[in-house]
Amino acid sequence: MEKFNLRKDCVSEQTYGLGIKEVWEIPEDQLESGFVQHTLGYPLQSSLMDKNFGGTFLYHQEPNLVHAGLVIGLDYENPYINPYKEFQRWKTHPDVKKHFENGSCISYGARVLNEGGYHAIPKLTFKGGALIGCSAGFLNSVKIKGSHTAIKSGMLAAESVHDVLVTKASDDIIPVSESGELDEAEEAVEIVCYEENIKNSWVYDELYEVRNTHQAFAKWGLLPGLAYAGLAAHITKGREPWTLEHGTKDSETTRLNKDFKPIDYPSPDGVLTFDLLTNLQRSGTYHDDDQQAHLRIKTDLEHIPQDVSMQLYGAPEQRFCPAGVYEYISTDNSGDDNGSGGGDDDSLSKLVINAQNCVHCKCCSIKMPGEYIEWTVPEGGGGPNYQVM
């Protein structure tokens, strides 16, 4: 994005949601084939005007699986929110926990989703490449669905490449040989017609209809957001003569911890709810111990963890990371690692990055105060090993 300046014409900043998910095995006689449940409210929204964007999902899959998860918009303000613990708390609701009775959790994982929608779609092409699917931000956050738009964008990209390299249908391209092969001496081709093909497809039409919905929740809260979503879906269908912009990066929406009180989360029981490290084993994540860390503090930002994240925000990376990668340890062996911060406590001063725990969700590179973490692809194919996610 930065190298080719693909966001220069975007109306809004891209915004993201963190999805956390478990898969359970239950007795086959408890399975409700075709059961689908999406919820708002508990536990993310405590009032009808709460601006936290997100909700939960629960699906039954034959022969005996339950898929359950929570998605929270990373534009939330409270640095004490712990998405993983919010997910665990959600499972204790009477209408939810019944789905896990006599079952066992067999898989765990997490991933960031693009939620900016239509207004945040960047320029889609550059010489030698194109953005397709999730990388382009084609998720419909109202439907919580993006596989259909991803598949369509892949089809359109293939057709566009064919037109450029074989039929030469576009006048805006660099000529190539008759065989369609690019000579090493020639520049890379930019598939300019791909972006136009996307804009003329139902992908853009669908995203345009819900282009202001997420922003409505962020600006006005749960109840007004729901009202606006209903208006856009059933009446205006995207024909509103206005644009609701999302002009703030997710890393900049976090407010100072002095404005909030720490959240008291229930302790895990080891049956329905689990501590993070126990669940992390179910992700199958693995990185060679001797490889270079793929999570590094950016040059000249080494002061941010202690001076900014800890002192001003109460070390939110200890809470939003769904893999326990980031922790602050005591330099005086006090053992206090609750990350409460406050500005005067120097006992929590050293940031430790447990890169071996990483499940590659990318949350830290998005939500981290000051965006001080550089995420790079680890060597050797390390990372989570999802089986039934």
Image (tube, rainbow, N blue to C red):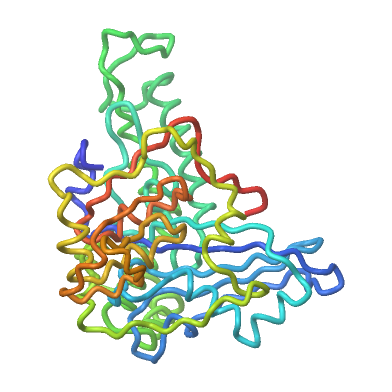
In depth, the one of 71 and 273 nearer the eye is: 273
Answer above or below: position of 365 versus 27: above
Q: Residue at x 39, y 91 (%)?
A: 48
Q: Residue at x 40, y 46 (%)?
A: 355
Taking the image as shown, residue 248 lies to the left or right of residue 78, namely left
In depth, the one of 218 and 140 nearer the eye is: 218
Residue furthest right as drawn:
29
Q: How many marks?
A: 0
Q: Position of residue 315 (x, y in %)?
A: 28, 67
| Quadrant position of residue 4 | top left
Taking the image as shown, residue 11 lies to the left or right of residue 51, namely left
| Quadrant position of residue 90 | bottom right
Q: Position of residue 371 (x, y in %)?
A: 23, 54
Taking the image as shown, residue 377 lies to the left or right of residue 152, namely left
Answer above or below: position of 99 versus 161: below
Q: Position of residue 8 (x, y in %)?
A: 17, 48
Residue furthest front as drawn:
333
Q: Position of residue 171 (x, y in %)?
A: 27, 26
Answer above or below: position of 162 versus 221: above
In depth, the one of 140 and 239 nearer the eye is: 140
Residue furthest left as drawn:
300
Image quarter in which the C terminus is found: bottom right
Q: Residue at x 20, y 75 (%)?
A: 256
Taking the image as shown, residue 255 lies to the left or right of residue 377, namely left
Image quarter in which the N terminus is found: top left
